[in-house]
Image: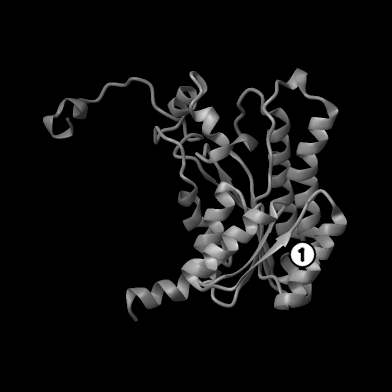
């Protein structure tokens, strides 16, 4: 077999129906386009319906892929049920659910108001929980399924002003493990991907901040932010059957941040070689 044939057999998403929440964002749009490019039928879900339609048209024009947009406010459980039902009616199944939806409000722990706490938790944790629950009901009838939740670096290591966000993402990892063990008997697996510090339009002000941008860069071994497209390869692998025995895991994509970040000054004779200069 050729390299192309082997890669297609391993990672092709042809005939897979993928539901993705938060599809209109900077990361969600890149992941949606990449999944479409390798054969997936994409069901794009987001509150920003106009942005979804723009993304839908781009995918159709560039990849000639099957794609449909669904307006979804994940804080309303009736909308989760209705949209999930619509997708099943339109495509007869949901093979993969990707929960990318999430928000953050950067405030000190002592400054957070109940309304802010509830808004972040309702979107990042409660909404994701009940989306998983609803989609899993349909996956059980097929005795197969794949759930990919998007966690965060902040589920493990914190920054100032991210207490509620970090708590919500820590909850996502716990939900993912619960899904993996409770749904395994029906052939359903669940995993999480936790991005590090990603450069998107929403984080532009952070990277351009006079102190925060340098602070983040110094914490990353790669010495730069992640590009949204650098998350896509792992998503493809996890959505494909090539990772069919992977379940209950969280994989960090953080440029070596959690490994220790940029090292301190250390002695090495190799740094003195002209070859490395």
Residue 34 vs residue 222: left or right? right
Q: Position of residue 41 (x, y in %)?
A: 60, 71
Q: Quadrant of residue 262?
A: top left
Q: How is the image coloured?
A: one colour
Residue furthest to the left in view is 274
The residue sitting at 74% across, 70% down in the picture is 87
Quadrant containing the C terminus in the rendered view: top left
Q: Position of residue 226 (x, y in %)?
A: 46, 41
Q: Quadrant of residue 60?
A: bottom right
Q: Look at the image and tell me whether residue 140 can be seen.
A: yes
Q: Nearer the viewer, residue 51 or 269?
A: 51
The residue sitting at 78% across, 52% down in the picture is 73
Residue 36 vs residue 224: left or right? right
Q: Position of residue 182 (x, y in %)?
A: 77, 60
Quadrant containing the N terminus in the rendered view: bottom left
Is residue 4 placed above or below 169 in the rendered structure? below
Q: Position of residue 94 (x, y in %)?
A: 70, 70
The residue sitting at 76% across, 44% down in the picture is 123
Residue 164 vs residue 150: left or right? right
Q: Look at the image and tell me whether residue 243 can be seen.
A: no
The residue sitting at 70% across, 52% down in the picture is 176
Is residue 91 placed above or below 177 in the rendered structure? below
Residue annotated with mark 1: 135
Is residue 242 placed above or below 268 in the rendered structure? below
Residue furthest to the right in view is 78
Residue 177 vs residue 81: left or right? left
């Amino acid at each position: 077999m050729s390299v192309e044939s082997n890669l297609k057999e391993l990672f092709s998403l042809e005939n897979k129906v993928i539901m993705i929440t938060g599809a209109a964002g900077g990361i969600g749009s890149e992941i949606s386009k990449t999944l479409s490019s390798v054969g997936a039928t994409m069901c794009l879900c987001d509150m920003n319906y106009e942005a979804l339609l723009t993304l839908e048209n781009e995918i159709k024009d560039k990849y000639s892929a099957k794609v449909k947009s669904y307006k979804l406010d994940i804080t309303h459980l009736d909308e989760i049920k209705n949209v999930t039902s619509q997708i099943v009616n339109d495509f007869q199944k949901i093979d993969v659910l990707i929960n990318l939806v999430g928000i953050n409000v950067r405030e000190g722990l002592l400054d957070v108001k109940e309304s802010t706490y509830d808004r972040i938790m309702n979107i990042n944790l409660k909404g994701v929980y009940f989306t998983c629950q609803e989609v899993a009901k349909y996956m059980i009838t097929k005795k197969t399924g794949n759930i990919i939740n998007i966690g965060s670096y902040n589920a493990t290591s914190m920054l100032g002003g991210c207490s509620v966000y970090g708590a919500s993402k820590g909850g996502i990892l716990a939900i993912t493990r619960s899904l993996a063990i409770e749904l395994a008997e029906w052939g359903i697996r669940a995993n999480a991907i936790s991005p590090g510090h990603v450069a998107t339009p929403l984080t532009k002000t952070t990277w351009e901040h006079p102190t925060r941008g340098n602070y983040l860069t110094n914490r990353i071994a790669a010495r730069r932010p992640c590009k949204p497209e650098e998350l896509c390869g792992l998503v493809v692998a996890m959505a494909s059957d090539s990772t069919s025995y992977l379940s209950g895991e969280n994989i960090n994509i953080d440029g070596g941040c959690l490994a220790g970040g940029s090292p301190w000054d250390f002695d090495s004779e190799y740094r003195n070689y002209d070859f490395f200069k």
